Image (cartoon, rainbow, N blue to C red):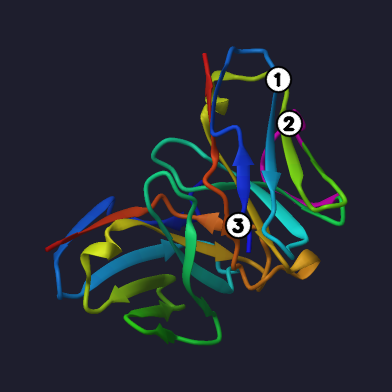
Amino acid sequence: DQQVKQNSPSLSVQEGRISILNCDYTNSMFDYFLWYKKYPAEGPTFLISISSIKDKNEDGRFTVFLNKSAKHLSLHIVPSQPGDSAVYFCAASAQTGANNLFFGTGTRLTVIP
Amino acid sequence: ETGVTQSPTHLIKTRGQQVTLRCSSQSGHNTVSWYQQALGQGPQFIFQYYREEENGRGNFPPRFSGLQFPNYSSELNVNALELDDSALYLCASSTGGLAGAGGELFFGEGSRLTVL
């Protein structure tokens, strides 16, 4: 049973435009959400996170939005750069700070120069 | 600062065999988690070790076991390998111990296991 879902396996965006990656979850006990980025032959690297007490968190070009009522979060990248091309995983945990993360299946972002 | 390192990077085993995967945590990190990433899937939590004891486990059978050593390095052992065990095994370290670390895990590159 996939508790975290990323329904778009891939996304292509022109350099300089906005990339929007979406994620849905089913477990209402999730209270902490994260995005990880993965390049080929490397492990996932942490990108940005958000607690369920917030609806937005921003870090430079990256912003995560959380809609608890819809059980939906999204990652916005503005402006997109070719170096952002990677697989992005959405993850969630049921206890803030817990290492038991539930991951989505990932979205492959390609930023076209 | 040394990151998370895993060995071996690739290995091939046959069904029924046993395998040991190794992980050196990032300097200063006392907690190690292991994840299994099957092809086309996201990483799936196997278990976590803190102070040399398992303190969290995902939906994996007992033939998946682990160890953590005093220097915080860790091993993942899988007995009686099955074809479905073919996957990328990721080790992640953090400083959070039982309380976690805000979910900020530092992953290694992984060990790709193929079971024939």
The residue range painted magenta reads B53-65
User: Compared to B64, does A45 lie above or below?
Assistant: below
Dot 3 and dot 2 residues touching (CB under 8 Å): no
Q: Residue at x 55, y 86 (%)?
A: A53
Residue positioned most to the front? B1
Q: CA distance from mark 3 to mark 2?
A: 22 Å
User: Compared to A49, does B62 lie above or below?
Assistant: above
Q: Which residue is mark 1?
A: B18
Q: Which residue is mark 2?
A: B77
Dot 1 and dot 2 residues touching (CB under 8 Å): yes
* SS type, badge 1: loop
Q: Which residue is mark 3?
A: B3
Q: CA distance from mark 3 to mark 1?
A: 27 Å
Q: Position of residue B97 (x, y in %)?
A: 78, 65
Q: Is residue B107 left or right of residue B28?
A: left
Q: Position of residue B108 (x, y in %)?
A: 57, 50
Tell which circle, 3 or 1, labels the residue nearer the N-terminal end: 3
Q: Is residue A33 left or right of residue B49?
A: left
Q: Chain of mark 2?
A: B
Q: Is residue B9 left or right of residue B74?
A: left
Q: Residue at x 52, y 70 (%)?
A: A33
